[in-house]
Image (tube, rainbow, N blue to C red):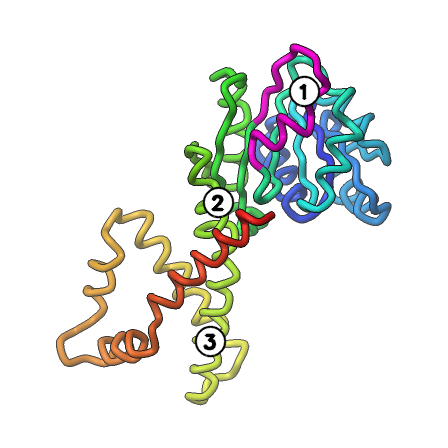
Amino acid sequence: MKIGFIGLGNMAKAIIGGILKDKIIPAKDIIGSDKSADMRDGAKKQFGITVVDSNIKVVEESDILFFAVKPQFLPDVLTEIKSSIKKNTVIVSIVAGKTIGYLEEGLSTGKSSKLKIVRTMPNTPALVGEGCTGVCPNENVTKTELDKVLKILSSFGQAHVVSEKLMDTVGAVSGSSPAFVFMFIEAMADGAVAGGMPRAQAYEFAAQAVLGSAKLVLETGKHPGELKDMVCSPGGTTIEGVRALEEAGFRGAIMDAIDAVIEKTKML
């Protein structure tokens, strides 16, 4: 099996890193292209994979082909490569906002062959092996093929199959939300600095609190509200902080942010 990447940015590198970490295939069986020579050279130096300056070369050699380009560059890529895709190649897209139907239409050559497409939405925590990826295959992808893709995507975190109608929501609650979490960590650290703590130490305390809290949700299976109540003692300090957040519209602001991302994604 040979895996190819069109685009060698951060997400592609996270996927390649996971593949090599889990020994799914060796580096010699991974090939990638990117319009930037620096990106190609960086991927080759970091991972020891084969890099080329031809998208068509990647397509011709790949059994599983990842589209890892920005949405605005995808139309040109589809036009360039559509005549070179092999019959049984499984195409995996990580391009935000581009539906399976869009990919099928963009890759159509008028032939009767049925394209095998898996639409995915990973997130940046994949860079440290803690990603969460939404996965949606079209009807031409077999169970065996989907299992191979899920094994790859699970090499850098969790991967869950969802219906395509939920993919924009996945992009918001998983893909974009790390930015919101980083803002939360920064804000907590700012508060700690205002309280006299050195900034570097404040970031460590705030980030570890978020990490530990997330693990509690995932590993205990308890409702987040129940875990919150465990911290809030009657008449205590934490409930005063909760009250301040509620007065500032904390939950509503987060929900509005998720909704804004979903609406923007639909416009891509």
- Residue drawn at (46%, 34%) of the image: 164
Q: Secondary structure at mark 1?
A: loop
- Observer-nearest of 10 and 84: 84
CA–CA distance in space, label 1 to label 2? 27 Å
Give the total number of marks visible in the rendering.
Answer: 3
CA–CA distance in space, label 2 to label 3? 27 Å
Is 86 magenta? The answer is: no
Range of residues picked out in magenta: 99-117
Crowding around mark 1 (Cα neighbors within 10 Å: few <14, some 14 to 19, many 20+) is some
Give the residue type at disc 3. Ala
- Observer-nearest of 29 and 71: 71
Could you tell me which quadrant the N terminus lies in? top right
In this rendering, the answer to whether 210 lies above or below 158 is below
Q: Position of residue 196 (x, y in %)?
A: 45, 89
- First-in-chain label (1 vs 2): 1
Give the residue type at disc 2. Asp
Nearer to us of marks 2 and 3 is: 2
**Mark seen at residue 187:** 3
The residue at which mark 2 appears reads as: 168
Q: Position of residue 16 (x, y in %)?
A: 65, 37
Q: Position of residue 145 (x, y in %)?
A: 54, 19
- Residue drawn at (13%, 76%) of the image: 234
